[in-house]
Image (cartoon, rainbow, N blue to C red):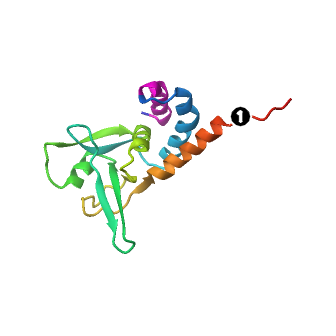
Amino acid sequence: MEIERQLEILINDGAKYGVAPTVIENAIAPALKLFANQLKYLEYYVVQNLQGDWILTTISNPKLRQEKKVIYAFASVQDAARFQGKVDPDILAVAIPVTHLLFRLISLQEVDSVIFADNSSNITSSNITSGIEIQRDRLSNLIKQQIRQLNQTPPNIA
């Protein structure tokens, strides 16, 4: 599904998410589109449990003494299966339109980033050779900035 159609669905379903459709259309959608256009695919596969919760992975950089929680999004269901490394009947990969995935990321306070694994070579849980990382804070800050601009009252021209 094309990005414009994905955004249209989010706008139309705005009330269901507790967000005014005009806010989604004028503040959130442009930010989602900006980030989605940096990615290679229109939908990605996210690994989740049977309750629909996305599987978080904690990654760390010992040199920087830094740790973060990420969700991996894969270009194919096969890549998602390879990442798991073993068959687990309680875990499945679900296709999600890219803008919907980014929209959901905004509300996941426990998640630092989504890493979009576009390259299927060497995908395992211990080695992801490449990917595009989208940080929740960067996306959220852009949306907040868009909302502030939306709420500014135009100067009185008269």
Q: Residue at x 50, y 41 (%)?
A: 32
* Quarter of the figure that contains the C terminus: top right
As helix, strand or loop, the secondary structure at mark 1 comes to: loop
The amino acid sitting under disc 1 is Thr
> In which image quadrant can residue 149 be found?
top right
By secondary structure, the bulk of the magenta-drawn segment is best described as helix
Task: Examine the rendered structure and indicate whether residue 103 appears above or below residue 78.
Answer: above
Q: Which residue is mark 1?
A: 153
Q: Position of residue 85 (x, y in %)?
A: 18, 55
Residue name at image x 74 percent, y 34 percent: 154
Left or right: 16 as drawn, with respect to 24: left
Instruction: Tell me: 51 left or right of 135.
Output: left
Image position, residue 132 (x, y; %): 42, 55
**Image position, residue 117 (x, y; %):** 35, 54
Rendered position, 56 above or below 152: below
Residue 56 place in picture, x, y as percent: 29, 51
Please tell me whether residue 14 belongs to the stretch shown in magenta. Answer: yes
Q: Which residues fall within the magenta stretch?
A: 2-16
The correct choice, above or below, for 6 with respect to 116 in the image is: above
- Residue lying at the far right of the rendered structure: 158
At horizontal 31% and vertical 39% (from top left) the residue drawn is 95
Q: Quadrant of residue 49?
A: top left
The quadrant in which the N terminus is found is: top left
- Of residue 18 and residue 115, the one placed in the foreground of this image is 18
